[in-house]
Image: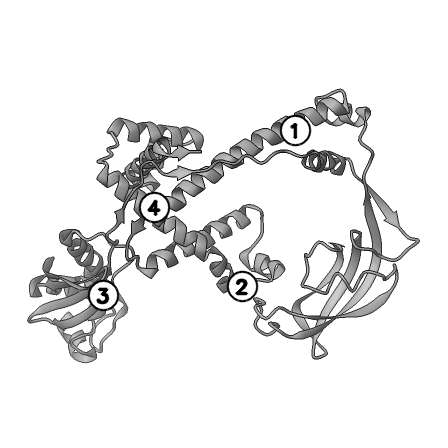
Amino acid sequence: MSLKATNNVGTNTYELEIEISAQDFEEALQKAYMKARKNIALPGFRKGKAPRKLIEKEYGENVFYEDAINFLYAPEVNGAIDASGLELVCEPSVEVEEISKENGVKLKATCTTKPEVEVKDYKGIEVEKTVNAVTDEDVQKQVDQLREKNVRIVTIDDRAAETGDTVKIDFEGFKDDVAFDGGKGEDFDLELGSGQFIPGFEDQIVGHSIGEQFDINVTFPEEYQVKDLAGAAAVFKINLKGITKKELPELDDEMVKDSTDFDTVDEYKADVRKKLEESAEKAADTKVEGDIFDKVIENMTAEIPQVMYDNRVNGMVAELEQRLASQGISMDLYMQFSGQNLDTIKKGYAEQAEKQVKLRLALEKIAEVEKIEVSDEEVEKELNDLAENYKMEVEQIKSFLNVEDLRKDLAVGKAVDLIKESAVIK
C-alpha cells in the first residue's frame, strides 16, 4: 500500500491518493486468474488449463482487472485510511483513476470524517426540577387497570354496534370495483374506536347489527405505504358476524384480595399512590437529565455531516425491525397497520436521531477535554458484566464487540456523570 497524499477538499471531506505498484497489481492479477481459470475453456485446452496470456488475448488484457481490484480493495483502502489517521463516519467512495500492468493502479478515496467539535459551559448547568403531584384521577386510572384485568366479555345480540364494542367481521376492499391485495380478512376482531384501521373505517361500522352486510367508503392516507392505494378511494364490503363488549367489575375488598397482595381497597389505593409518586419522582429526574443534555447540545458547535444523521436514523429503523421480529411481526405488516411507509418512519426518527448524534459528539469531546481515561480493569469488569447478563463467555462477547468502542462508551459514561454531578438543580 502506498498513501501518496491526503487532501482536504471541503468541510469534513478528504481525498486520499492511493497508489498500488505494478508488482502488487501483477500478483493480484495472477490471483484473479488462478481463481477464474477453472471456469474458462479455450479451444485446444481442457477446461481450467488455458494459459493466462491466451485468455487475456482472447478476452482482452483487462479481463482480470475487476477481480484483481476486488482482491486489493479492502487491504489497500483500509491501510490508506489507517495511515492517514482520519476518523471516518461512513464508507469512503473509491474511484479507479488509472490502471495498467506497467504502472499499477491509482485510486482516489473520498472520505467523510468526524467533525471538529467545541463544547462550552458544560459544567454548572442550571435546570429546574418539577415533580408532578399525583391526583385522585391518576390513582383511579391505575385502579381501572386492575378492573380491566378482571373484565368479562359479554356477547351483545339485542342492539347495534357502538364505539367501544369489539366486532367480528369479514371484510374485503375494492378499488375501482377490483379487489386489492391485503384488503381481505375473515373472522377479524376489531375494537371500534381503537384506530386500528384507517380513518373512517371503524366509524362506519357503528350502528350496524349482527347479520348485516354493507359497504363502507374510505380514502387511504396520502402517505399510505402501498403506493397504488395512497390517497385512493376504496369500498370495503363488510359482513358483521358478532358483537361483544367489555364489562368491568366493581372494585371491592374481595376483588382486591383475589387480585393483589392487599386485603382492602384502601390499602391497595395507598400502595398505588405511593408507586405513582415514586414514578413521578423518577420522571422528574429523567426530565432534569434531558434538560441538562439539551443545554450541552445548545453549547456545542460543529459542522456535522448529514450522513451521520442518516446512519443513526437507519440504525433506529433496524432496531425497530428487531423489536418487531421478536414479537413475530414483520416490518411490512407493521407499516400496513400503522399506515406508514419507510420514509415516514425515518422522518419520525429524524429529530431524535439528530439529538443523539449531537449529544454523542459533545460527550466524546468533553471526555477528551477532561482527559477521562478508562482502565483495562474497568473494561474487563464491563465485559464480565455483559457476559453474565447475556449468559455468555467473555471471549464470545469479545468476538462481536469492539473492545476499544466499549472503552470509548465507558469514557462517555464518565463524561455524563461529570456533567450531572456539576449541574445545579433548582
In the picture of the structure, the residue carrying the numbered disc 2 is 341
Please determine whether, in this image, residue 165 is positioned above or below residue 399.
below
Q: Which residue is mark 4?
A: 360
Q: Amino acid at mark 4?
A: Arg
**Label 3: how many Cα within 10 Å (few below 14, some 14–19, many 20+):** some
Task: Measuring from the top left, give residue 262's x and y in whole percent.
Answer: 72, 21
Q: Secondary structure at mark 2?
A: loop
Quote the CA–CA distance across marks 3 and 1.
62 Å
Front of the two marks 2 and 4:
4
Q: Badge 2, how many Cα within 10 Å: few under 14, some, many 20+?
A: some
Tag 2–tag 1 contact (CB < 8 Å): no
Residue at 67% across, 28% down: 272
What SS does tag 1 mark? helix
Disc 1 residue crowd, few under 14, some 14–19, many 20+, Cα 10 Å: some
Mark in the foreground, 3 or 1: 1
- Which class describes the residues within 10 Å of circle 4: few (<14), some (14-19), or many (20+)? some
Residue located beneath label 3 in the image: 94
Three-letter code for the amino acid on which mark 1 is drawn: Arg
Are the residues tagged 2 and 4 within 8 Å (C-beta)?
no
Earlier residue among tags 2 and 4: 2
Instruction: State the separation of the CA atoms marked 2 and 1.
Output: 41 Å
| Comes first in the chain, label 2 or label 3 | 3
Q: Position of residue 348 (x, y in %)?
A: 50, 57
Counting residues from the start of the chain, the first of labels 2 and 1 encountered is 1
Marked residue nearer the N-terminal end (4 or 3): 3
Residue located beneath label 1 in the image: 273
Quadrant in the picture for residue 120: top left
In the rendered image of this protein, does residue 256 appear above or below residue 59?
above
Q: Secondary structure at mark 4?
A: helix
Label 4 with label 3: CB-CB less than 8 Å: no
